[in-house]
Amino acid sequence: MADGSGRIRVLHVSQPNEGGVAVYVGQAAADQRRRGWDVAVACPAGGDLSARCADAGVPWLAWEAGRAPGRRTPAETLALRRLVRGFAPDVVHLHSSKAGLAGRLPHRTPTIFQPHGWSWLAATGRQASVSRMWERRAATRTGALVCVGVGELREGMRAGVRGPYRLVRNGVDRHRFRAADGTARLAARARLGLPPDVPLAVCIGRLTRQKGQDVLVAAWPDVTAWCPSARLAIVGDGEDLDRLCARAPAGVDLIPAVADPRDWLAASNLVVLPSRWEGLPLTALEALATGRCLVGTDIPGIREVVRPGVGVLVPPDDPAALAGALTSRLRCPGVTEEEGRAAVVAAAAYDIAGTMALLADVTREVAGFGAAGPGGPAGRVLGSGVEIDGLEAGGGAGLDAGLDAGLDIVFGPGEEGIVTPPNSSR
């Protein structure tokens, strides 16, 4: 257990063991270990999260859990409870919906829940309603609801989820992801065995309905009708692989998932995110830091990143609009280069150091040790800021006005709300 030195014991729990959530969990666990905390990660075998833990010197605990709720959920819950008892953490940090379900059935350990995209967004019909009802109830037994972006926070509030929200925007490691100029692009293409001069769009992410690669594949023939030499690289693995392979037209390459996406980002002319829903995608932030313009869907999470001047937004599930946006930029490299330069500047607002520092403050708060930053006591301002009268955690005009103004909202139990300057925090 934590002692007077502030050494906190944290157990991170995640069913996703690869992709953006695994990257985030690995980053958070490694950062907290560097702070001198006792940290462990529980997740299923496979993927790359256990390897990330090993690289950081963080213990990995095997927790076998499926992605969707079902008949195995009670057994998964009991297994997680045994892991919690064995590790005896001060805080259990639950990532994504399955961990959020199994880890918030009644127990005594304080919890942080981080949805990384709310569960009902992936559901339809009755399942979506059940998911919203569960999140409303589970929020009452959660020490902090950590949202990775403003859009995710809004989605939760508008669905009626009331609880101790904390906005901790995703961040990017700008020491690893650096601006890649034309020379770097050519070098990356040489390493990947790509032609040096073709217009190249890259889409990186898990192959699943959420990420919308099916819409991108449907749009691509319209792109090549106007830009015949254009190539599209879809990088990732997932349940939609066979379906996408069967439908992929000429000019589309499906590339297995890579542990390090930097070469693909550097090789691209632009990065495309055709997602149907997101929290705040790490790929978008990595693309910004690499100096690549973004073509993305106009949804919460992507809208937050793709500001005017760094790319363009199109409606989700609209192949024609997506094709038009891609074509206009692939045929006009001067536009993509200009937006890429602006993207590098925009990436400075999402530095991973700020993200991890704020997450550490939230974790200390939930553990009962208060925030270490300039905000002072637990539940107050995490960072310099001022309290705004009349801003209610339940949403409404005050909340939207604060969010639309680009402010971070930090809600504590029983408080009206605190507004702090934008966090510099995939």
Image: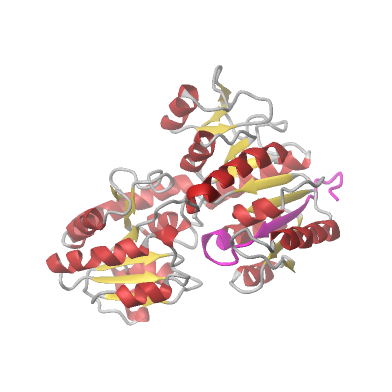
**Image-quadrant location for residue 160:** top right
User: Does 5 lie within the magenta span?
Assistant: yes
- The magenta stretch is 1-23
Residue 279 visible to the viewer: no
Image coordinates for residue 278, horizontal then vertical, percent: 46, 51
Instruction: Give me the residue at 61% from left, 23% from top.
Output: 416
Relative height, residue 342 to residue 386 (above, below)? below
**Image-quadrant location for residue 364:** top right
Relative height, residue 188 to residue 106 (above, below)? below
Instruction: Give me the residue at 74% from left, 67% from top.
Output: 61
User: Does 144 lie within the magenta span?
Assistant: no
Image coordinates for residue 19, horizontal then vertical, percent: 52, 64
Residue 258 visible to the viewer: yes
**Image-quadrant location for residue 73:** bottom right
Q: Residue furthest top?
A: 389
198 vs 373, left or right, is left
Instruction: Give me the residue at 38% from left, 73% from top.
Output: 243
Instruction: Give me the residue at 61% from left, 36% from top.
Output: 165
Relative height, residue 48 to residue 23 (above, below)? below
Image coordinates for residue 95, horizontal then vertical, percent: 62, 54
